[in-house]
Image (tube, rainbow, N blue to C red):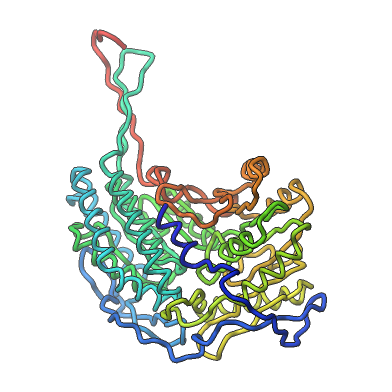
Amino acid sequence: MAAALRISSLLSRSLASSTYSLLSNGRICGAGRSVVCSYTTAAALEKPITPSVKVSYTKLLINGDYVDSASGKTFPTYDPRTGDVIAHVAEGDAEDINRAVSAARKAFDEGPWPKMTAYERSRVLFQFADLIDQHTEELATLETWDNGKPYEQAAKVELPMISRLIRYYAGWADKIHGLTVPADSPHLVQTIHEPIGVAGQIIPWNFPLLMFAWKVAPALACGNTVVIKTAEQTPLSALYAAKLLHEAGLPAGVVNVVSGYGPTAGAALASHMQVDKLAFTGSTETGKIVLQLAAKSNLKPVTLELGGKSPFIVCKDADVDKAVELAHFALFFNQGQCCCAGSRTYVHESVYDEFLEKAKARALKRSVGDPFVAGIEQGPQIDSEQFEKIMKYIRSGVESGATLETGGERIGDKGYYIQPTVFSNVNEDMLIAKDEIFGPVQSVLKFKDIKEVIRRANTTSYGLAAGVFTQDIDTANTLTRALKVGTVWVNCYDVFDAAIPFGGYKMSGQGREKGIHCLTNYLQVKAVVTPLKDPAWI
C-alpha cells in the first residue's frame, strides 16, 4: 500500500502551491470559449539529458543465454523525447518463439524448477526482489529512456511496487496447497494444485517493467516456466530484469524473453501448440485476436487485461479542490497512457463550473518536459503513432462540438510532447467520450443525479475501473455496487497494492492480475480419489 500511495504523493501537486494567470491565445473552439495555453514546458524545449546507463542487453534471452534472432534481423527502439534511435534490438519471429518454447518446455518437463521445493523457489524470487532494489537506477533509467515516463515516477514509485509485488508472490510460493474433501462414500478425496506448464505472456509498452513483474512473478511462484514477448516499443528494461532474475538463481530455460512484433512473434506465441496458458495485456482489439489464436490452436486458457474508458464521478458534496487534483491525477498519470485512466470525468451540475475552471488551471500548471528532469510530471507520448492518434482525437473533439478549454497542441518540434488538454461540454456520443484515447486528454461531463450518472457511466463496452469522489457513505455504497467495473476507487485513485486484484468487466478483459486471484491463472486443480478399506470414520 505504501508504494501505491507514493503515486499520489509524488505526482499530485496542490493547487495552493502556486498561482497562475489564465492567458488566452485567442483561439476559439466549440461554444466560443477562449482556449488557454500557458504551460510549464521549458524543459521540453531544452537539449535532452543524456542517460547515464549503457544499453547492455539487446539480444533475445533463450535457455539462459542472450542470442541473436534466428533471422539475424534487428529493429530500432526509439527515444520518445527526440525520435532518435536508442539501440537496435534482436527481432524475434516464429522460429525464435519455437526455440524459446522448446527451452521452456524442456525446463518444465525435465528441469529442476518445478521439482524444486516451493521454499527454494521462493528464495529465488526474494533474491530477485533484492536485486531489483539494488539496480533501481539502471532499471528506472532504461524505463524512462525507452518509454518517456518521468524518471521520478519510475524510480520512486514503480520500482518499489515491482520489488514489493515480487516479494508478495515469493511469500505465496510455499503456501499453495489443496484440500482434503469429505466424500459421501468411503473414499479419500484430495485436491492438488499443479503448475499449468509453459506460460506464454505478452506485455504492453505503457508499464513495461511493472507488467513484466505482474506476469512473471505469479507464474514462477506456482512452478511454471515462461516465454514472454515484450512490446516492440519498449524491450530494454525486461531484458535487463531477466538478467537479474538469472543472477538470483533461476535455472536456464525457466524464463525466456523474445522481443519482436505482434503479428509475427506475438501471433506465434498465442497460437503455439506447446504453450499451456496465455496472458495478454494490451488493447481490446488485439486481445480479441489473441483469444482467437489461442482457441484455434490448443484451446489454451487466456487471461486478458484490456482497455478501459473509466468514469471518475465527482458528487455534489465533494471538496472541489481535492476532487480536481484527484481527477487530474486519474487522467494525466503516465501521460494518460494508462488502461484505467479516469478519462470520463462526470461532475455534478452544482459544482461543475467551479470544477471546470480549477481543472483547467491545474492542467495549465502541469509541468511537461524531459522526463529525466526533476519535478517533471509529464514526458512525451510513446511514439509517433500514438502521438498522431491522440492529436486525431483532439481534432475530433473540436469538430464534434466539445469545447476545448485548454491544450490541444504539440509542444516543441522534436519528440512527442502534447499539451495537457481539457474538453468541456462533452456528450457520450462523441468519440472522445467513447474511445480509449490513451493520452493527456480530459473530458468533463455534467450530470444531475446519481441514477443518471450510473446509467451514463455504464453505457460503454468497457468495465475496467471507476473513481468515486464523495463525502457521503450511502452515495459511495450505491455507486460502488452499481458501477459495472472491476475496481472502484473511492476518494482515491490508482492504488495498486500487490494484494489487490485487478481486471475488468465486459470488454476490458477476463481474469485478474495481482493478489491471490492471479494464482489460479497458473494452476491446474486435480482431484485424487482413493478407496478407504474399513475406515474408522468417513
- Residue 350 x %, y %: 78, 57
Asked whether, in this view, residue 308 is left or right of residue 177, the answer is: right
Q: State the residue at coordinates (58%, 75%).
A: 18
On the picture, is 5 further left or further right than 490? left
409, above or below 249, in the image: below
Q: Quarter of the image holding residue 50?
A: bottom left
Residue 509 in the image: x percent, y percent? 53, 52
- Image quadrant occupied by the C terminus: top left
In the picture, residue 143 is in which quadrant? bottom left
Residue 325 visible in the current orientation: yes
Residue 252 image offset from top left, x and y in percent: 19, 60
Q: In percent of the image, x 79 and y 73: which residue is there?
A: 401
The answer to whether 247 appears left or right of 338 in the picture is left
Q: Residue at x 59, y 64 (%)?
A: 325
| Of the pair 70 and 338, the residue shown nearer to us | 338
Q: Residue furthest right?
A: 31
Q: In the rendered picture of this protein, how many numbered marks are placed on residues? A: 0
Q: Is residue 317 above or below residue 385?
A: above
**Residue 462, image quadrant:** bottom right
Residue in front for this viewpoint, 188 or 460: 460
Instruction: Name the spot of residue 9 as percent of width and height, x first.
Output: 47, 63
Q: Residue at x 35, y 75 (%)?
A: 142
Nearer to me, 422 or 246: 422
Can residue 274 be seen here? The reply is no
In this view, 64 is above or below 417: above
